[in-house]
Structure formats: C-alpha cells, structure tokens
Image: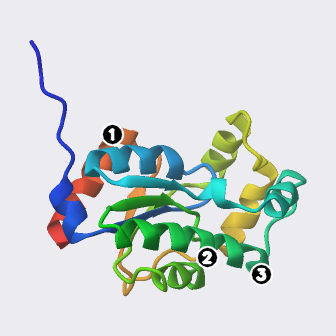
Amino acid sequence: MDEKAPQPQTSIVRALPAVVVMGVAGCGKSVVGKALAAALGASFVEGDQLHPPENVARMASGQPLTDALREGWLDAIGRQIAASVGSGQGVVAACSALKRSYRESLRGFCQDIVFIYLMIDPATAKRRVGNRKGHFMPASLVDSQFAILEAPDADERALTLDATRPVSDLVGDVVVQLSAIL
C-alpha cells in the first residue's frame, strides 16, 4: 500500500509564526524541534549553534553560563526568529529558555511566540546528556539548569509536555494543541 507522506500543517504556521521548544539539556529540544518544524513546514533554528565560542568553551569545561553570558546568545536566537517571521516563514527554534526573563527577551523579537516546555526529571536528563556524543554540554551541568529553571507560568503562552514520551507523539500533540489555541 502506497501511503502519501503527511502534509505540513502550513495553516498553523500562517496563524502562528514562531514556536520555541524549551527545557533543560537532555529534554529533546533539538529532536522535537526539528520534527515539529518538518510537520509545520517551518524553518528550524538550532539555538546551540548560535552560542559564541566563549560560551561553548565555558560549558565544555563544566561551568554554567551566567545571565550576562546568555544575553547575546538569546539575542542571536531572537534575531533568527525575527528574520524568519519577517520573511513570512514560520519558525521553530530550540532554546533552553530556562527563565521567564529569557522568554521575555525572545518575545521582544516576536510577541507571538508559543513556548513548548519539554518537562523532564533530573535523572533522565543526566542520563540522556551523558549518552550524547560530540556535544559540548556535560552531564555535570544538568543540575545547574534545574537550579535556575522557571517553568512557564499560566499567563505565558506555553504548552507543557512530558519529554519522556515518543517524539512522534509529542509532535502530534503539539500540532493538535496549536490548532486548538489558534
């Protein structure tokens, strides 16, 4: 049986141009973000690729980033989101966005962002980060991310999902929930 590939949900992209998949290291931001971008027919921004070399070196050495060090990184992600939206392209970005102030910074570039918070427990996050190959973020920094994590409040435009579920289920849920809020 020859089935057609699922068509991207471009109507959602037209109504909702920007989505940020957020959470601590190891929650699946990049994997879910890429799959969601494909499902929505949107571009994908990998926040980790926008860290300046100094940030990468600091994290690779086991030192957490400060708010000041995150500022330029968040601005780079925000500019990428704004450029996509400005060109009429929907966008999904992967960014930890751990604090409300970080999310507010991103909203300064695009007010219509919806955040997808991938909630995960510390043990699972550490295990996942420890099993990654070729990534600068060591598992030893996972606790520092949980220490500053501020889950989205009820007044923020955000969906919270269990990050231990299969990627396809998460993406399907996000598409359904985004459709419902538009």
| Along the line of sight, the residue nearer the viewer: 94 or 166 | 94
Residue at point 19%, 30% (across, down): 5
Image quarter where the C terminus lies is bottom left
Alpha carbon separation for disc pair 3 and 2: 11 Å
Q: Which amino acid does the dot numbered 1 rest on?
A: Ser
Residue 159 visible in the current orientation: no
Give the residue at the far left of this rendering: 1
Q: Answer with the quarter of the image where residue 115 lies.
A: bottom left
- Residue 83's x, y, as percent? 44, 69
| Left or right position of 142 against 92 | right
Query: From what the image shows, is residue 21 above or below residue 181?
Result: above
User: Mark 1 or mark 3: which comes first in sequence?
Assistant: 3
Q: How dense is the environment of label 3, judged by Cα within 10 Å: few (below 14), some, or many (20 and up)?
A: few
Residue 20 visible in the current orientation: yes
In this figure, which residue is indicated by the disc labeled 1? 168
- Residue 148's x, y, as percent? 68, 74
User: Mark 3 or mark 2: which comes first in sequence?
Assistant: 3
- Residue 135's x, y, as percent? 72, 42
Identify the secondary structure beneath mark 1. helix
Identify the secondary structure beneath mark 2. helix
